[in-house]
């Protein structure tokens, strides 16, 4: 398993994306995103996607300037991405939402018909760093989630992400799907030839599926359980439906259904805290709450009580020094697409 320093990996990804002919700034944005996913411990949204991203860019790339504004008000904008890169589009949506919230308390931006936006947790902290509360919701990706009581795939992962500013550290960050596990983590198990834990995937008899390859090869016979699993999955299932009802119609992407529209639907929200309460007062309140909650006594086998997002910060500090471990198949695939595009791969 190769170990690559983050700056070396970032530079390689950037050069691969730039070699497809897309704008230089966009190549940098996407490279930063996938490497940052690794640094936060989420290999499920990392460089195993680089080859697919690069080949899609080479085939057809829609710049942000060619997207279409479908609706615009002081607090809202709906954008038809026309197939634009999802990571670039979502970063632009963050900027627009913040600017609208400065003037209108709330800034909503809806995106439809954009490509994969990757890790939701990367976006809301950019809003929180500007003294606002940030949220992102997504209805996108392949059919994945089985309704409570079934194994048929009927919904997407339906993730949400939230971030709020913190006085004594990086922003709080919550990033979660309405399923027990993100789809990329199943892919990672398959790449690494590791079994799935019981409680992730079931078959049509309600029995656990531990073979990641079977899940990927049998979409009609297997489904991922909603958050809460076989006993309490009605909660995750209900939340997934909520995300669909919020994002699908309001972003103009449409809800998930048989024969529904392709592409991803995204809703971004920025809330201007200063229009409700002084930012320092807000940060004091949430800091005192966080310190109180995290002062709870850990169980014997628990290292410490973390606030949302703190584990990622610890992982990042370690990986910035130690480097990022990549499965050999992922490194090989990056090398293949680099060769296709005439990009030199560093020796490691």
Image (cartoon, rainbow, N blue to C red):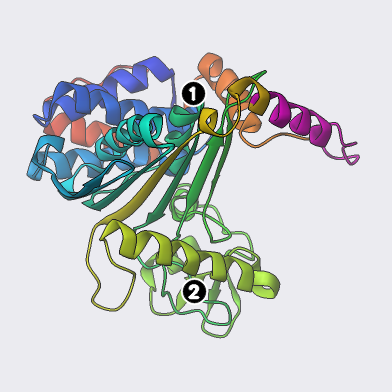
> In this orientation, which residue lies closer to the viewer: 336 or 183?
183
Residue at image mark 2: 146
The residue tagged with tag 2: helix, strand or loop?
loop
Mark found first going from the N terminus, 2 or 1? 1
Q: Quadrant of residue 190?
A: bottom left
The residue tagged with tag 1: helix, strand or loop?
loop
Q: Position of residue 115 (x, y in %)?
A: 24, 49
Q: Is residue 326 visible?
A: no
Q: Position of residue 60 (x, y in %)?
A: 8, 44
Q: Is residue 14 above or below residue 85?
A: above
Q: Which numbered marker is on residue 129? A: 1
In the rendered view, does 168 fall on the left or right side of 342? right
Q: Is residue 302 magenta?
A: yes
The region drawn magenta spans 283-303
Q: Is residue 50 above or below residue 219?
A: above
> Circle 1: is it few (<14), some (14-19), or many (20+) Cα within 10 Å?
some
> In this orientation, which residue lies closer to the viewer: 325 or 114?
114
Q: Quadrant of residue 91?
A: top left
In the rendered view, does 285 fall on the left or right side of 35? right
Point 47% across, 39% down: residue: 43
The C terminus - image quarter: top left
- Residue farthest along the bottom direction in this orientation: 205
In the rendered view, does 249 fall on the left or right side of 240? left
Q: Position of residue 279 (x, y in %)?
A: 59, 23
Front: mark 2 or 1: 1
């Amino acid at each position: 398993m190769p170990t690559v320093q983050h700056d070396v990996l970032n530079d390689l990804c950037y050069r691969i994306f730039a070699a497809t002919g897309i704008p230089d700034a966009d190549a940098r944005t996407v490279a930063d995103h996938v490497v940052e996913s690794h640094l936060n411990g989420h290999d499920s949204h990392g460089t195993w996607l680089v080859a697919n991203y690069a080949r899609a860019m080479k085939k057809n790339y829609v710049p942000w300037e060619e997207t279409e504004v479908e609706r615009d008000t002081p607090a809202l904008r709906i954008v038809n991405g026309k197939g634009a890169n999802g990571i670039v589009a979502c970063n632009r949506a963050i900027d627009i939402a913040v600017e609208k919230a400065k003037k209108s308390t709330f800034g909503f931006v809806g995106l439809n018909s954009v490509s994969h936006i990757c890790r939701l947790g990367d976006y809301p902290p950019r809003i929180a760093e500007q003294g606002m509360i940030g949220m992102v919701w997504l209805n996108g990706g392949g059919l994945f989630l089985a309704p409570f009581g079934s194994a048929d795939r009927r919904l997407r992962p339906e993730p949400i992400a939230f971030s709020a500013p913190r006085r004594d550290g990086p922003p709080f960050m919550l990033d979660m799907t309405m399923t027990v596990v993100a789809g990329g983590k199943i892919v990672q198990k398959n790449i690494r030839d590791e079994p799935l834990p019981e409680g992730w995937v079931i078959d049509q008899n309600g029995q656990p599926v531990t073979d990641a390859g079977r899940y990927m090869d049998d979409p009609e016979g297997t489904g991922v359980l909603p958050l809460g699993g076989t006993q309490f999955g009605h909660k995750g299932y209900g939340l997934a439906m909520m995300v669909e009802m919020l994002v699908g119609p309001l972003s103009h992407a449409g809800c998930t259904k048989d024969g529904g529209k392709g592409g991803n639907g995204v809703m971004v929200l920025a809330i201007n805290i200063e229009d409700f309460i002084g930012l320092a007062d807000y940060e004091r309140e949430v800091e005192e709450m966080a310190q109180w909650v995290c002062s709870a006594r850990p169980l014997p086998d628990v290292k410490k009580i973390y606030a949302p997002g703190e584990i990622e910060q610890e992982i990042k500090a370690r990986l910035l020094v130690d480097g990022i471990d990549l499965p050999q198949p992922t490194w090989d695939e990056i090398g293949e697409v680099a060769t296709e595009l005439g990009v030199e791969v560093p020796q490691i």
